[in-house]
Amino acid sequence: MSPLEDWLEGMQPRLTGLLDFELSEGDAWDYSAASLARLEAEMLSRFVPTPDFLERVSGYLGEALLTAGGGRWAWDPGRGLPLVLPDEALALPPVCPADLVERALAAADGGEFGRAYRALELAVVERRAAEPGWEPHKEPTPGLDEVPGAMPSAELDTWLAVRKETWAAWLAEYGERPERWDFSVASLDELEALLLRLVSAPEELAARAELSEGAAWYLGEVLRPVLSAHWCYFPGDPDGENMFIGRPFLKQPVPNGRMVVPFVLLKGVLARREPGLLRQVAERLT
């Protein structure tokens, strides 16, 4: 898992910890400018804010900026920090929430978060004036943004139909012991052995499209009923930094809301190459 994926995976528990344990009940924490003013005031009221608290503040601040200006999370590998990339149509530079937090602590005037938010709001207003009807687009953040799993998705419908129709041929092509492929968690040992035999490194998996698509579908179909999950899909570049874009994934209903990308799990197995790992991961998930 990349640092960005790790940051995104931890966003929901990070913000839950902030809202449930750090902030006052009854206030509206809706990613608005007013909520940022309250958050900055709370941060400045603390004699020595803890690193965990400041990380949670950075997460909320970033989500607020994305709500205002659209865009997505990214990662600065040189500094090891998450970035907010506003909607490309705004042509704005990346924003580092951790830098804004540091500047807010140094200035101590209670207005740093609001200034960053209003700058994005102004850019959006100017873009709307130049292109009537335009709205900023925010890539979904796992566990925070509603996944349109029940909404029509022609890409997902086609993918699922193709996988079902070609399953017998896929198994005949790749499965050494087809009688063991019974969609049980135990059968994942067969899937893992197949992948370790045919794919030497995780970066090679995407190039083996037919193999990887069938393997991801099978893994998902094993996990789907035990997780009570459903297939979802966000269109986009599957080779981008957001692992939930461009590849089918599973989402549990609330309150659990766990999201699993089978293709990413398969890459992890290929990276570690430990027999039995895929079944262990599945058992932990279920």
Image (tube, grey):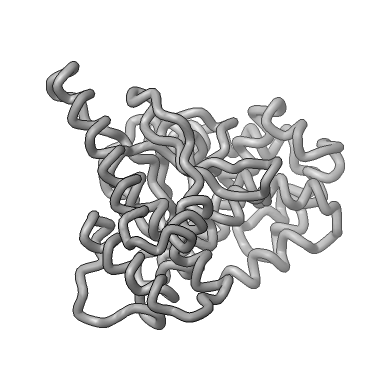
Along the viewing direction, whichever of 131 and 38 lies nearer the viewer: 38
Taking the image as shown, residue 265 lies to the left or right of residue 259, namely: right
* Residue in view at x 78 percent, y 43 percent: 195
Question: Picture quarter containing residue 37?
Answer: bottom left
Q: Is residue 93 above or below residue 130?
A: below
Q: How far from the left and from the top, in percent, is residue 117?
A: 30, 46
Taking the image as shown, residue 271 lies to the left or right of residue 3, namely: right
Q: In this view, does 234 lie above or below 143?
A: above
Q: How far from the left and from the top, in percent, is residue 176?
A: 80, 44
Q: Name the residue furthest top.
A: 130
Q: How far from the left and from the top, in percent, is residue 26?
A: 19, 79
Q: Is residue 59 at all visible to an observer of this figure?
A: no
Q: In this view, does 160 lie above or below 13?
A: above
* Residue in view at x 44 percent, y 79 percent: 46
* Residue in view at x 67 percent, y 53 percent: 181
Question: Picture quarter containing residue 120?
Answer: top left
* Residue in view at x 35 percent, y 74 percent: 42
Q: Is residue 13 at all visible to an observer of this figure?
A: yes
Q: How far from the left and from the top, in percent, is residue 47?
A: 48, 80
Taking the image as shown, residue 231 lies to the left or right of residue 114, namely: right
Q: In which quadrant of the rendered image does the C terminus lie?
A: bottom right
Taking the image as shown, residue 116 lies to the left or right of residue 33, namely: right
Count of numbered marks: 0
